[in-house]
Amino acid sequence: MNAVGSFEDGKYDTTALQGQPIHLGLDIKLQEYGEKLLQNKKGCIVAIDPSTGEILALVSAPTYDPNLLVGNKKIRANYPTLLKDMNKPLFPRPLASEYMPGSTFKLLQSLIGMQEGVITKNSGFPCNKSVVGCHNHPSAQNVTQAVKMSCNPYFYAVTRRIIQQGKKKSSFEDSEIGLQIWADYMHSFGLGVRLDTDITGLRAGNIPDPAYYDRWRGKGAWKFSGIRSISIGQGEVQLTPLQLANVASIMANRGWYYTPHFVKSIGDQGPLDKYRKKNYTMVNAEHFLPVVEGMRGCVHDPGGTARLARIDGITLCGKTGTVENYIHGVKQKNHSVFIAFAPMDNPKIAIAVFIENAGGGGGTWAAPTASLMIEKFLNGEVKSTAKEKRIMDAKLSNWE
C-alpha cells in the first residue's frame, strides 16, 4: 500500500466517501463444497440461479492459496512458480476453457430441429451404428427417448436435416445456408459469443459458421458430411463451462435466461439494468417440454445415462456428455461432462460440471458431482454419503 499525501498544501484535498456495499449472489458454502469435491481433479463447476442469473458457485481446479500473492514480496517469489505450473492453477477454467461439449449439445439440436420443422417431438430414427458409433440401446422413437438414451445416430440425422434442408440443389450451397441458420440459433443461446457478465477473462468458445469453414477448407469446398461431428458436440464446436451452465439455465426456464453475473445488488438498488433483461432464444417454449422430459428420464428412468445423479425426493433433469480428448493426435482419457437443473418445476439451481481426463462417461464422474452440489444447495446438507465419499476419494489427476 502506498501512502498518498496532500498536494499543493491541501488545495485539492477531499473527504473520502464510503461506497455502497456490494452484495454477491455467490453461495460461500456451496463454493467451499465444490472446491472439496474437485480435490485431486482437474476441471470446474459453475452453478447459477436460473430465476435471477446470479452465479452461485464458480469452482476451478486445481486452485492455489491466494495468500501466496499477498504483497509485492510474495508475488515476486510465488507468481513465476504458479505461472509455470503445468496444471495451470492460475487459469480460470470456468470462464476461459473452451471444451467440446459432447452429448450435452444434443439438447440444442433437438430444439433447433423442432423449431425449424424438420422434425417433430414424435420423430424417430434408427440407431444406425454404421453412420456414427453409439452404445447399445433401442432405437429412439421420439425426441424424449433420444435425449434420455443419448443416441448418436439420432442426432446425426436431426442435424443433417437442419443443415441440409434442400433450399439449394447443390449440397455445398445448401449446407452453407443451413449452417448459417444453425449458427444463428446457437448464438441466441449465448454460444459463440462472450456473455456480458461482470467478471473479466471470458472467452467466446466457437460455433462454426460458413465463414469459419470457408477460411479453413475453401469457399464451396465443404458440406454437412465433412462437418458431421458437430451433431454430437465434437469437432470444431467449443463452449466454456459458464456458457454450458447458462444452457442449463435456459433449459430450466424453457427458453430464456438472464445474463449470468456475480453482483446481486449495489447497496439496495438491486442488479444493473442489463442483468434484469430476459434474453430469449429463437426456440419457442413448447419445444422445450419434450427435451426437458428427456432430461428427467436421463436421470430417473431405466435406460437413462445419468442414474448416479439421482437424489431422493428431488426431480433432477440432466444430460451427460462424454468428450473425446486428443493431444497431438494421441487419444487421452475422455472428459466427463454433465449439465442439469433442479427441481424440474420451479428450478432453483442450474449447473455444469467438467472433469478433465476422468475416463468413463459423463454419468460416471460429472453427474454424481453435480448431484452432490444440487443436494447441498437445495437441502443444506448431503445425505448421499456413499456417493460423496466416492467423489471425495477419487484421484483423477496427479496434482497435489
Image: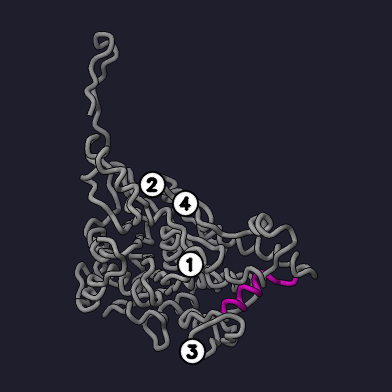
Q: Residue at x 31, y 66 (%)?
A: 397
Instruction: Kindly identify the amino acid type of the residue bearing the numbered disc 3.
Output: His
The question of residue 230 being in magenta is answered with: no
Earlier along the polypeptide chain: callout 1 or callout 3?
Answer: 3
Relative to 220, 291 lies left or right: left
The answer to which of 263 and 77 lies nearer the viewer is 77
> How far separated are the C-alphas under marks 1 and 3?
27 Å
> How far separated are the C-alphas under marks 2 and 1?
30 Å
Residue at the spot of label 4: 203
The answer to which of 29 and 296 lies nearer the viewer is 29
Q: Position of residue 282 (x, y in %)?
A: 57, 62
The question of residue 164 being in magenta is answered with: yes
Q: Position of residue 147 (x, y in %)?
A: 49, 79
Earlier along the polypeptide chain: callout 2 or callout 1?
Answer: 2
Residue at the spot of label 1: 326
Q: Residues within 10 Å of mark 1 (few under 14, many from 20)?
A: few
For the question of whether residue 99 can be seen, the reply is yes
**Label ID, residue 199:** 2
Q: Position of residue 361 (x, y in %)?
A: 40, 76
Q: Are marks 2 and 1 in contact (CB under 8 Å)?
A: no
Q: Is residue 55 above or below residue 152?
A: above
> How far separated are the C-alphas under marks 3 and 2?
43 Å
The answer to which of 107 and 335 lies nearer the viewer is 335
Q: Which residues are magenta?
A: 154-166
Residue at the spot of label 3: 137
Earlier along the polypeptide chain: callout 3 or callout 4?
Answer: 3
Dominant SS type (magenta): helix
Q: Are marks 1 and 3 in contact (CB under 8 Å)?
A: no
